[in-house]
Image: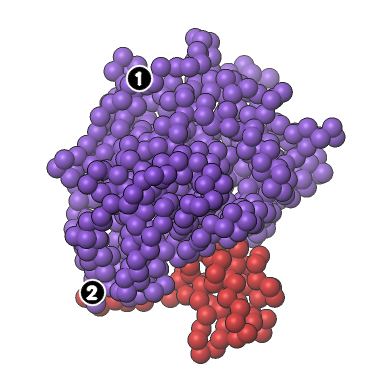
């Protein structure tokens, strides 16, 4: 059986102009309880890799530049 | 998978609330002790109080309440099925812990004289202490971990606790959810503080991680305790909570109650006398939802502007701060509209109800060298402060236990078997995804296990769980993150089966909605005034037995005994 991929709108958005992952910052990735954020190694920016969000907000609260914005996932909204 | 071998005296599994306290207190008791705190997330922001907590729900503060009063209240709220000595161990340590947290910098609400501003939410006594600035809780705990020189390992998912030839704990096994490295941590003792099993049922929204509890708390600890041979107590006493519909977080009547907010039906009328969460309260909530008076709401729109402002500050900056943006998106202003509420999916959580890994008043499980604290352990209605007090008890008692104990040889066959079990999904190219297996399990939990409980439905559920167990052996994981979800899916299946078997065992109804068993609708004290204990039988299957309720140390009189069964507002009072 093959694996299909279903795209969904990610609740966590990262403003790439503000994100300073290229300077070595990984705060949002570090604090996420669900471990769903990652650094894109090509773009050197944080992004939501897995749509498994508890909309708990440590990523947004702890981001030093205010680059992370969490929305309530659409299914709940 | 690279194998990493470590050796410690004490391993604390779970760095949310009780875990950090256990680790700090073990080091205080014996600074020479080698203590490791393991978390599958990052201890800076892990667990139920990731974003702090809006108040203490069970503060026993001299001048406001006594430990005896509190033990009575919890006994009555649990239909009498409690180990009073264990509840008393919490109550007796409650005030010391509040004072210690106060010294550590936790800000509690105080009145103009500097006394703690305790509020009444429970049916009988006053135990609620607001923490308007409670969002800093994890920072304060982290500072104590650093000060106490506790070693921390983040992003390691513990899957099993091993015991040696003498039946005592001698190792903890797990893997890194980013590298898939396999961890073998030899130790003399372990504390499980993995929180609730909050990912058994599926939220009504269908969003897998939109659970009431932090979804990292998926029952790993319950499953590892079970496989280590420990007893689990009263698992049929589910946790079901009132919550903001769809958002699936607390509304929260404990915070708003003292300000004049209350749970209302669609007519805006009060229908329960007391908003404190008990099984009976949830049954009345459930009845109102099913009746022509539903849905149920949190009513604040009658309050003054400054009161609502204060409530908003507490609810939108603490514990689940995204509540504010949820309401905003829907245009739901507390000032003009009631907030629609619903009931949560089922779970195991002693923080609010009464089920979990069985522990005594010292935090000891039935396995030598294994301790448990917080939402995963069996001390009822423990909330955050109970996790701290039992974290302390577990840490101190485990430290003493480690003294003079020599580590025994670890069974390498068992280690290899666990390594192979963990590694399997990574090696499979095209199996079922962990998402599918988890979703299906949790959907069936909703279909068949959500109360009211019916024997035939539970039997069907058990058959379907068996089928999924076979399917689960075909799970594939594309990366270490998915491997974490795959291993969690196994824990979720274990917990779902435990929930079903424990419920079928207790052939009566008790604890209101938590164990509302349609085939046996009456409470039956003659046969069932006892705990139920679930453990792994000699044949490897789940086995259940009764355990007598320990002799009471605080007497309960007849009038008090039934206080929580008279929660519905009398018709004449509702009309008034």
Which one is in front, A39 or B503?
A39
Mark 2: few/some/many CA within 10 Å (<14, 14-19, 20+): some
Please give the residue where the numbered disc 2 appears in the rendered image: B428
The residue lying at 37 percent from left, 53 percent from top is: B187
Comparing B32 with B436, the one in front is B32
Give whichever of discs 2 and 1 has the lower sequence position: 2
Task: From the rendered image, report the letter of the chain displayed in purple.
Answer: B
Residue that extends furthest to the bottom in the rendered view of this protein: A42
Q: Report helix, strand or loop for mark 2.
A: loop
Please say whether residue B282 is visible from this viewpoint. Answer: no
Residue drawn 53% across the image and 14% down it: B560
Q: Quadrant of the N terminus of chain B?
A: bottom left
Q: Position of residue B266 (x, y in %)?
A: 59, 37
Q: Determine which residue is flagged by label 1.
A: B529
Q: CA distance from mark 2 to mark 1?
A: 49 Å
Across and down, in percent, residue B567 comes to 54, 23
Q: Classify residue B448 as left or right of residue B43.
A: left
Colour of chain A as rendered: red
Is residue B222 left or right of B467 when viewed as pictured? right
Crowd class of label 1 (few under 14; some 14 to 19; many from 20; radius 10 Å) = some
Which residue appears farthest toward the left when viewing the image? B539
């Amino acid at each position: 059986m093959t694996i299909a991929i279903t795209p969904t709108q990610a609740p966590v958005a990262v403003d790439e102009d503000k994100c300073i992952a290229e300077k070595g910052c990984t705060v949002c990735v570090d604090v996420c309880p669900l471990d769903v954020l990652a650094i894109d190694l090509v773009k050197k920016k944080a992004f939501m890799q897995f749509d498994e969000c508890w909309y708990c907000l440590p990523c947004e609260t702890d981001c030093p530049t205010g680059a992370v914005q969490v929305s309530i996932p659409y299914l709940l909204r | 998978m690279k194998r990493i071998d470590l050796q410690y005296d004490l391993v604390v599994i779970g760095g949310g609330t009780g875990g950090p306290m256990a680790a700090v207190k073990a080091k205080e008791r014996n600074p020479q002790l080698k203590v490791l705190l393991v978390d599958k997330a990052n201890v800076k922001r892990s667990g139920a109080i990731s974003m702090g907590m809006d108040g203490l729900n069970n503060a026993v503060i001299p001048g406001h309440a006594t430990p005896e009063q509190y033990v009575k209240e919890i006994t009555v709220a649990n239909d009498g099925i409690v180990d009073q000595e264990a509840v008393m161990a919490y109550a007796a340590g409650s005030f010391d812990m509040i004072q210690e947290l106060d010294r550590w910098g936790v800000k509690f609400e105080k009145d103009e004289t500097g006394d703690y501003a305790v509020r009444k939410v429970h049916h009988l006594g006053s135990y609620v202490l607001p923490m308007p600035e409670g969002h800093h809780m994890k920072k304060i705990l982290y500072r104590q971990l650093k000060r106490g020189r506790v070693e921390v390992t983040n992003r390691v998912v513990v899957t099993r606790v091993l015991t040696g030839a003498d039946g005592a704990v001698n190792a903890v096994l797990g893997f890194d959810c980013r590298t898939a490295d396999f961890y073998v941590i030899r130790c003399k003792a372990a504390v499980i503080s993995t929180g609730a099993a909050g990912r058994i049922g599926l939220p009504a929204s269908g969003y897998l991680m939109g659970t009431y509890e932090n979804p990292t708390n998926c029952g790993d600890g319950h499953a590892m305790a079970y496989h280590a041979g420990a007893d689990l107590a009263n698992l049929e006493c589910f946790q079901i909570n009132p919550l903001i519909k769809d958002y699936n977080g607390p509304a929260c009547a404990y915070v708003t109650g003292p300000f004049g907010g209350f749970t209302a039906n669609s007519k805006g009328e009060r229908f329960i006398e007391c908003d404190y969460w008990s099984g009976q309260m949830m049954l009345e909530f459930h009845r109102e939802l099913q009746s022509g008076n539903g849905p149920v709401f949190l009513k604040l729109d009658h309050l003054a502007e400054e009161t609502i402002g204060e409530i908003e500050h507490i609810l939108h900056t603490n514990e689940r701060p995204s509540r504010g943006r949820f309401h905003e998106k829907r245009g739901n202003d507390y000032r003009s509209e009631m907030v629609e509420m619903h009931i949560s999916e089922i779970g195991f959580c002693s923080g609010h109800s009464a089920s979990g890994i069985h522990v005594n008043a010292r935090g000891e499980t039935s396995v030598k060298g294994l301790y448990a604290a917080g939402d995963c352990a069996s001390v009822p209605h423990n909330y955050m402060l109970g996790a701290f007090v039992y974290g302390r008890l577990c840490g101190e008692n485990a430290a003493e236990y480690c003294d003079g104990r020599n580590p025994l040889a670890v069974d390498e066959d068992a280690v290899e078997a666990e390594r192979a079990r963990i590694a399997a999904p990574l090696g499979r190219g095209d199996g079922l995804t962990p998402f599918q297996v988890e979703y299906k399990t949790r959907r069936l939990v909703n279909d068949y296990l959500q109360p009211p409980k019916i024997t035939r439905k539970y039997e069907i559920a058990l058959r379907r769980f068996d089928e999924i167990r076979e399917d689960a052996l075909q799970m594939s994981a594309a990366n270490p993150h998915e491997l974490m979800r795959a291993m969690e899916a196994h824990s979720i299946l274990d917990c779902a089966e435990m929930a079903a078997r424990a419920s079928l065992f207790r052939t009566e109804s008790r604890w209101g909605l938590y164990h509302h068993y349609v085939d046996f609708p009456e409470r039956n004290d003659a046969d069932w005034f006892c705990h139920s204990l679930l453990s792994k039988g000699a044949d490897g299957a789940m086995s259940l037995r009764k355990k007598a309720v320990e002799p009471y140390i605080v007497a309960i009189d007849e009038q008090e005994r039934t206080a929580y069964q008279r929660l519905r507002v009398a018709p004449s009072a509702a009309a008034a």
